[in-house]
Each structure stands twice: as C-alpha cells, then as structure tokens.
Amino acid sequence: MKQSFFYLLTFCFLIFWSSCRNDFDFRVSEGSLRFSKDTVYLDTVFSNIGSSTYTLKVYNTSTANILIPKIKLQNGPNSNYRLNVDGMTGDVPLSGNEFTDVELLAKDSMYIFIETTIDILDLVSNQTQFLYTDAIEFGQSDLQKVELITLVKDAVFIYPQQITNSDGSTEIETLSFDVDGDGTAEATSLQGRFLEAAELNFTNEKPYVIYGYAAVPEGEILTIDPGARLHFHANSGLLLTNNAAIHANGLPSTDSDLLENEIIFEGDRLEPGFSEIPGQWGTLWLYNGSTDHQFNHCTIKNSTVGIISDGNQNDPSKLLITNTQIYNSSNFGVLGRATNIKAENLVVNKSGQSSFAASFGGHYDIVHSTLANYWTNSFRQFPALLINNFTIDEDQNAVPNDLNSANFTNCIIYGNDNPELLLDNISGAEFNFKFKNCLLLFSDNNNVFSGPYYDFSNLSLYEDMRFNLAPEFLDPAQNLLQIPLNSPAASAASAAGNLNTDITGALRPVPADLGAYNAIDFEN
C-alpha cells in the first residue's frame, strides 16, 4: 500500500512539474523576426540550369519560444524558387514553397536554404536575359518579407547525347576521330560530339554552354564572333581534329571591365566566388593535323590547360595567338608539343605548372609577350617558361624531337619562383633558341644549372637581356600585369621585334616597352 502511494505521489509530482515548465511552450508570434539579409541576390544563372544553394538566417531575438504560423513564397506554387526551412521541405513534401507552424526557440535561429531553376521562355520571349524576383513571406497578418532576386540568361547549350543500350543501361556519347594520323578514326573516352554545320559560327547573341568536348569536324572552320561568351562545364572544352580550324577573332574593347568585344572562354559557374578558380573546365585542344588556328583579343581563364597545340611543327600557320590573355590554368597556360606557335601581345599568368611550355621540340616565335607565373594555390615544379626537346613515352623512355627554333623577343618572363626558365634538352635532337631584349628572372645561387645553354654571356643565345629586375607589375595576384613608367622593362625593346600596338590597341612608343603592355602612369 505504501509502495503504491509512493508511485502515485511521484506520478502527480511529474505531472505538476511538467505543467509548470514553459520551455516547451510556443506562442504565435508575427512581425518580430530578424534576418541576416533584407534581400537575397542569387547570382546569374543560365536558363534551365539549377543555381547554387544560398542561405538566409532567421533570428528569434525574444526570450519566448515562438511559432511562425506561415513561411511561404509570395508567388506560391508557381514560384521558380525552392526553399528548405531547417531541414523541412514543405507542407507538401519536396514542394519547397509553403511551411506551416514553424517552431523557433527563444534566442535561437534557423537556416533557410534557397535554390532556383528558371526557364526564361516561361517568363519572356525574344529576350536573352530577365530579372526574376519573388519574396519569402513570414507570418499571416503582420507580414515580414525577404526579397529574392536572380538574373537569368538564355543560352545555347551544346552537349553529347545519352545513349540507351539494348540492356537498358545508358552511357554518354563519346568522340571517335583520327587520333594517330593513320587516316582511320579511333574510339576515345572523351565525352562529346561533333558540331553540325549550322553550329560552326558562334555569335555574341547568347552565351554558349558546353558539356563535354565540342569537336570541329575534319576540314571545317569554327568561327567565333567578337563579344562571344563560351562557358564550359567540368571536363569540357573544344577539340579541333584533322584539317579543322578555329578562328576566334575578337576586337579591341572600349570598356576594360566589360570587355564587350573580347571573346571569353571560361567555366559555367557564374557566381563571383568562382570567377578566379583554376581548373573548372578542360582545354582548347588543337589536335595533331588541325591547322590555321587564330586567337585574337581573347581571354581564356580558369581551365586545366588554356591551349594545347599538338604536332604540325613545320606548319607556320598552325597557331597564331595575338592580343590574348590566359589566366588561372591549373596546369599549363599554353602547352605546345612538337608544334608551331607564333604569339604577339600574349599575357599568361597563374598556372599550376608552366605558363608557357614549348615541349617536345617544334617552332616557337614569341614577341612582346608577358609570360608570368604568380601561382599560389599549391607547389609548382616548373617555371613560368619551360623549353625542352623530348617527351616521355608510355614505357618511360625519353623520345627526342628537334627544337628547330624558340625565339623570345621583347618579352617579360617573371614570377614568384626563381628561376623562371628551364632549358631541358637531351642529345639526339636539335635544341635551338634565342632570347633577345627580354627581362628574365633567373638567379642560380646554388649553381644547380650548368652547361653551355645557361651561358648568359653567349650573345648568340642571349642578347641585350635584363636579369632579375622586378618589372613592378600593377597587381600580379589580380592578373594585372601592366608596368609603370619607371619599370626596368620600360623603353627596353628592340626595334627588330617591335609591334605597332600593345595588347590594348595603344600605339607603342619609340623605343617600345617590353611585354604585352605599354608602360603607364600608375598614379593616373
């Protein structure tokens, strides 16, 4: 009896105690929330491509637990936004547009995650971009709002097909082309497809978004108009096959920020946080057998390798690069392999390996170019400029090939490592090069580099050189490689390799300055 009375007393105490607690009580509250942002700006998205996830933090600043009667999108079920409220996906699961009786503890906060996918054709016709807006509403009678704003752009999408096999499995279309030059197409593992005839002119009307490798068929020319914008997904790029060519000829721009006439090759992540991230896409691959490639007033950024040029070393029209910038390549800016490259007013910076690699021999003629490397993302094993006359085959054997010529005139070769030049030659092949009127960072304090090719007093190899003098770039960490009037690179050029204009289109002074840019007054 006493035991039963004890249990009854304990039970009554627990009931009484719990009824007195208020930490589990919630009162309906409206109009008293605080937000981390008044407006959430979702960065520009392409039509029908999902955005990144953005966050909004909601604060309960009161000392009471509150119940928010309603959180919903102003446009309701028709909204193109999706919400996740502290892990909840909506009154209708996964709908993401309306939430009822959301609890928020005293002095606590919660996250709202926001995404969008928008088809611009559902909103407007005959427009290439549209500002889409909505709002998150909190409460019912005393509404609080947080605005949502997204710029959506229409685009031309190029992607390989998904193939369904007889057993029901699926795979992505891959490219087959003449890989080894024997006249027979070989299957490859490169996902992508060949461009059709109607796709061989990229205009500036809409941006292009490319998944996989867009390949130019044999004997065709891909023409890219001034002002065109090309965006590549991860592991994507352009591939030029036998006798195919790319003519990417932009024009000088009047606005140095908008670069309205520049042709820009970059990744498909449009958020500002991705604007300078290396390695977001593959490369522009100029395969052995392709020829007559032209890049003028182009910007190539955030790739794995900016340009790969393979083969055709005796073809003087293989590749011409003029007035072009290549930045943030996770491996090489320009990688030439037994090829023929002529470059004028070329600027390369921030490459995970070399900014310019003249490898496996070939012909190279580089004039008034700035080959810098201020890579800081990781350790790099190669300097800004690499020159060699061999490759390593699959059996780890060195295979030589003639370096017929590698001429660098009126160039700046500099960076945040030392030295910024490597001459790597083996016997059995020619190794011909010359530097004339260049500023070069090379200080071999430990006597690691020896041999006749590093004899800087040899005028047949090094003529009118300037060594280890900082060019005083404007801000190399931000890819601003202009030089000041008092730079040691100013007024140091040879007339023999002089170009009439610099990379911006400005007339060069006499005597001209080294590198791609005219020296300027930084104070003005």
Image (spheres, helix red, strand yellow):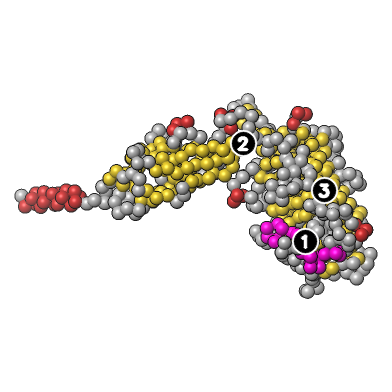
Q: Is residue 36 visible?
A: yes
**What amino acid is found at the position of numbered circle 1 in the picture?**
Ile
Which of the labelled discs sits on residue 129, or is there none? 2
Check contact, mark 3 vs mark 1: CB within 8 A.
no
Check residue 491 for magenta coloring: yes
Relative to 167, say whether 53 is above or below: below
Given the image, on which type of amino acid does mark 3 rest? Ile
Between disc 3 and disc 1, whose residue precedes? 3
Residue 94 lies, with reference to residue 379, above or below; the image says above
* Residue 49 percent coordinates (x, y): 58, 37
Callout 2, which amino acid? Gln
Which stretch did the figure color magenta? 474-493
The circle on residue 520 is 1
Is 104 displayed left or right of 416 in the figure? Answer: left
Figure quadrant of residue 367: bottom right
Q: Label 3 belongs to which residue?
A: 321
Could you say where residue 120 lies in the image, as x and y percent from the top left? 58, 32
Number of residues whose C-alpha sits closer than 10 Å to that of mark 3, classed few (under 14), some (14–19) or many (20 or more): many
Q: Residue furthest left?
A: 1
SS of the residue under disc 2 = strand
The residue that appears at 77% across and 34% down in the rendered structure is 201
Q: Main secondary structure of the magenta part?
A: loop
